[in-house]
Image (tube, rainbow, N blue to C red):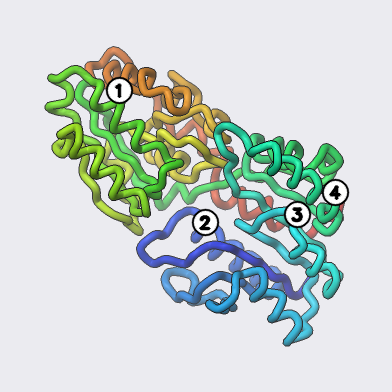
Amino acid sequence: MHKIAVICNYQLLPERIGGMDYFFWDFDKKCKENGIEVDWFFPNQSNHGGYSNLTIHSNESENVENSFLLFCQQNKIQFTHIITHFVELCTPFFYQIKKMSKAKVIAVDHNPRPLNRYSVKKRINKRVKGVLFSRYIDVFVGVSNYTVNAIIIDFGTHLKRKTQIIYNGVIFDAILTRNNRNIVKPSFLVASHLRESKGIQDLIDAVNALPKDIKEEIQITIYGDGPYKKQLTEKIAKYALEDCFVFMGSKSNLNEIFHQYDYMLQPTHMECFSLSILESLAANVPVITTDVGGNTEVVTSGENGFIFEAKNIKQLTAILEDIYVGNKKISINTRELIANSFSLPKMIDNHFRLLKEGVH
């Protein structure tokens, strides 16, 4: 093993540094320490944080898949392994890879699925793609048990033998920890990209349904940005809830911010495996979230947070009211429950192990 390629359909943004950025930096370091060179393919160039140490290729006139194929055609480099992140699975792209390379191909699936499943047409299309193109992927990796099952449902049961789970992880030492939690009148944060599928509109509806005295006091701070911000601010204005919500924009140091709050809210409609949930729990900040994706694999309702049904505004309102007046609370240190299972070093070791393993 001397040279590998990692293809990531992931924008490099200095204002948004999350768990995957740290993973990319540390995985590159681990490879170099073991004599393995890594060529990284991203949609754009950046040298913020650890990206200055990575060998990055980008072509802003092409998508990341075509950029990689063009690079291979022009440079004739032989990779031993080709890894994809945030790239659609079982497409002709993987056939094109195998046409020009003998590398082992590892596809990591971070993609959430819609709450009400794909349309029949799309489900059939994915099954057909599974038959045609899954043979060109040697190992499928899901970042949660939910994702592993979704891969098999989407593309066919024949993939079960070459699909495995590697959970995402976080750097615990870099996350500041909350020492005390307010039982009555706790503080809340949201850390999320602002798009419709994140369900923040449901949270606004839930707050609007709270008793008047709570609405006059509760405050929820929202970290993140995105295309749905205008709709959210309009809904807040419609209900006259401007004093309840504060938008802080994207922050690159959320690891230093979580501990300032008592609970994190994540009313998402679709999720794969949330690094924000892990980071919040690592800060000893319990999470109130939905029953989608891999959320229930890390949050146990009543133990380190509370789970409600996605889009069920009445359930969310009831949870918020009970927590705010002190009828419900989380007493344990949530950091200790996840420290052994979801660390970044464990995630890196498991991904690095794939470079040394034979193909199933």
Q: CA distance from mark 4 to mark 1?
A: 46 Å
Question: Could you tell me which residue is drawn at 56 percent across and 74 percent down?
Answer: 54
User: Looking at the picture, does residue 211 appear above or below residue 230?
Assistant: above
Q: Are marks 4 and 3 in contact (CB under 8 Å)?
A: no
Q: Can residue 96 be seen in the rendering of this structure? A: yes
Give the farthest residue toward the bottom: 74
Q: Position of residue 213 (x, y in %)?
A: 13, 20
Question: Could you tell me which residue is drawn at 28 percent across and 54 percent down?
Answer: 249
**Does label 3 or label 2 sit earlier along the sequence?**
2
User: Looking at the picture, does residue 6 appear above or below residue 249?
Assistant: below
Q: Position of residue 321 (x, y in %)?
A: 27, 18
Q: Amino acid at mark 3?
A: Cys
Q: Position of residue 284 (x, y in %)?
A: 37, 35
Which label number is shown at residue 90? 3
**Can you identify the residue that label 4 sits on?**
131
Among the 4 quarters of the image, the one containing residue 4: bottom right
Q: Is residue 61 left or right of residue 156?
A: left
Q: Can residue 55 be seen in the rendering of this structure? A: no
**Can you identify the residue that label 1 sits on?**
320
Q: Is residue 51 left or right of residue 211?
A: right
Tally the numbered discs: 4
**Can you identify the residue that label 2 sits on?**
20
